[in-house]
Image (cartoon, rainbow, N blue to C red):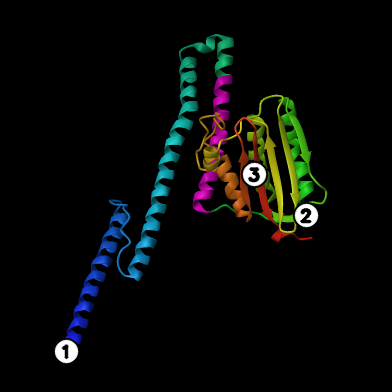
């Protein structure tokens, strides 16, 4: 009996060993496939618990690699599309000048003005690419220092108030003097605020309203930018922070590469906060930045 039990045990051990060997061989072949760029397929999560955990980690890695590759492809496609347009316009204007258009002073001036405008269009695109480069490489550095929130906010709002009023928008800012002092990077947070206000002003028609509010409780401080523009439906709200996203329904964010809100979200998260949107079609949008008070110094 003992011999039979021993043989059964050995048999079970051999079966398990062979099964384990086959599973490990499959994982090894899949890893070589990924390394060589031939195959990015996920594997069935079968086998002993340890193998299933290994396969789960491998599949998670594959999903991340697929996402990175898709992001890379979209980035290249957007670069070609967005940079190609102004370069094409510049090429046409240069060819016209070569062909003698500069002999007509009015036409020459028009072409030069157009060339200048196209070059200006390239600047924000290049800025977005530089910021995305930092984001991808994980070099999003912050220079945090004690910042009195109300003083910083009132100063940061000055140019945006002028921009809103010059477009014929109603402007309102509610900035309590009781806002705390936080450890933030004021320049990076001004970048976040500027992105939110730029969008609000750009896509709210004349006669509409743009407002800024701020407040705090025991754990958080918050900044809110509201507008009475076209608004966003539920599906758009789910995608609005994704790289390169631009709404087709409302033509919101038609210029640039659709990176502004992605970068703004990354900057807020780097501060330990979160960025949320509430919106309804034809009733405007409200973007709220939440910052933890863990950095409060008084």
**Residue 95, position in %: x, y?**
45, 18
Q: Which residue is mark 1?
A: 3
**Residue 260, position in %: x, y?**
57, 40
- Seen at 50% across and 26% down, the residue is 86
Q: Which of the two residues, 204 or 104, is positioned nearer the viewer here?
A: 204
- Judging from the image, what secondary structure is the residue with disc 3 in? helix
Q: Is residue 9 left or right of residue 278?
A: left
The circle drawn on residue 180 is 2
- Judging from the image, what secondary structure is the residue with disc 1 in? helix
Q: Quadrant of residue 255?
A: top right
Q: Which of the two residues, 74 or 209, is positioned nearer the viewer here?
A: 209
Number of marks in picture: 3
Q: Which residue is mark 3?
A: 192
- Seen at 22% across and 77% down, the residue is 12
Q: Which residues are magenta?
A: 113-138
**Residue 143, position in %: x, y?**
66, 54
* Up/down of 170 relative to 98, above or below: below
């Amino acid at each position: 009996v003992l011999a039979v039990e021993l043989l059964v045990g050995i048999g079970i051990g051999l079966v398990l060993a062979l099964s384990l060997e086959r599973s490990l061989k499959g994982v090894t072949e899949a890893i070589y496939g990924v390394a060589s760029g031939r195959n990015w397929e996920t594997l069935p999560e079968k086998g002993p618990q340890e193998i299933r955990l290994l396969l789960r980690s491998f599949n998670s890695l594959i999903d991340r690699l697929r996402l990175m590759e898709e992001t890379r492809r979209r980035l290249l496609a957007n670069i070609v599309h967005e940079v190609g347009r102004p370069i094409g316009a510049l090429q046409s204007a240069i060819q016209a000048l070569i062909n003698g258009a500069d002999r007509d002073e009015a036409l020459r001036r028009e072409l030069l003005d157009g060339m200048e405008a196209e070059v200006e269009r390239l600047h924000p695109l290049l800025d977005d690419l530089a910021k995305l480069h930092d984001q991808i490489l994980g070099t999003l550095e912050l220079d945090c220092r004690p910042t009195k929130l109300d003083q910083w906010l009132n100063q940061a709002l000055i140019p945006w108030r002028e921009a809103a009023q010059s477009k014929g928008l109603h402007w309102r800012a509610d900035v309590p003097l009781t806002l705390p002092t936080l450890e933030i990077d004021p320049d990076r947070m001004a970048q976040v605020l500027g992105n939110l206000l730029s969008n609000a002003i750009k896509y709210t028609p004349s006669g509409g309203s743009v407002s800024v509010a701020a407040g705090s409780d025991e754990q958080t401080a918050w900044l809110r930018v509201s507008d009475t523009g076209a608004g966003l439906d539920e599906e758009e709200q789910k995608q609005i922070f994704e790289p390169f996203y631009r709404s087709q329904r409302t033509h919101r964010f038609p210029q640039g590469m659709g990176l502004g809100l992605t970068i703004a979200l990354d900057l807020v998260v780097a501060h330990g906060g979160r960025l949320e949107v509430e919106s309804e079609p034809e009733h405007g949008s409200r973007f709220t930045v939440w910052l933890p008070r863990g950095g409060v110094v008084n």
